Amino acid sequence: MKNINPISIWDNGTVQEATVLNADVINDNLSTSATFYYTISSESMQQLAQGNLTMSGDDYDAWETNDYAYDWVAAQLNLTIIGDYVPPVVEPIEEVVVEPTEPETEPETEPIEESPAES
């Protein structure tokens, strides 16, 4: 995945900001062409646009790296890649243990006096 210069996309009645491009090869005949499925998403990874693009001819012949493929997809979509996408790091929530301020003690009980048994 790649970060892109933000673009505005109309989505479900609102304008959303797209910042992430993803592309996967869904078909490659290993000879003359490859088809890519792409998604354009917001920072929160809400998918805002998607589609397929087919690379062929000189572009396909020159394809040797993933970066080349991403650059080609971005060029077809008129997008500018600004870097690799780095997912946000979610900090784990630390368990808080509350120590008692005073040691727990058994409640004091008074001894039970037994009455003499009546005879």
Image: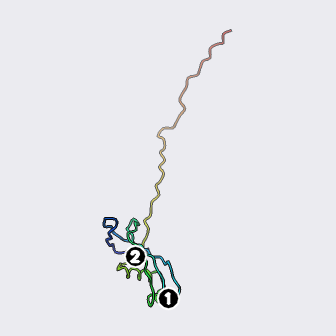
Which residue is the site of mark 1?
32
Numbered mark located on residue 83 in the image? 2
Residue 72 position, x and y percent, is: 41, 83
Query: Tag 2: Cα neighbours inside 10 Å, few (<14), some, or many (≥20)?
Result: few
Q: Amino acid at mark 1?
A: Thr
Relative image position of residue 8 (x, y in whole percent): 31, 71
At label 1, counting other C-alpha atoms closer than 10 Å, the crowd grade (few under 14, some 14-19, many 20 or more) is few
Label 2: element kind: strand
Q: Quadrant of the C terminus?
A: top right
Q: Quadrant of the N terminus?
A: bottom left
What residue do we see at 51% from left, 82% from top?
28
Q: Quadrant of residue 114?
A: top right
Left or right: residue 114 versus residue 38 is: right
Indicate left or right for 100 with 41 as reference.
right
In front here: 110 or 58? 58
Mark linked to residue 90: none
* 99 lies above or below 16: above
Please state which amino acid type lies under the numbered disc 2: Gly
Name the residue located 47 percent from the left edge and 49 percent from the top edge.
96
Residue at coordinates 58% horizontally, 22% vertically from top-left? 111
Q: Residue at x 37, y 79 (%)?
A: 77
Q: Residue farthest to the top?
A: 119
Of labels 2 and 1, the one closer to you: 1
Q: As drawn, which residue projects farthest toward the right?
A: 119
Q: CA distance from mark 2 to mark 1?
A: 29 Å
Quarter residue 115 falls in: top right
Q: Where residue 98 sits in the image (x, y, percent)? A: 47, 45
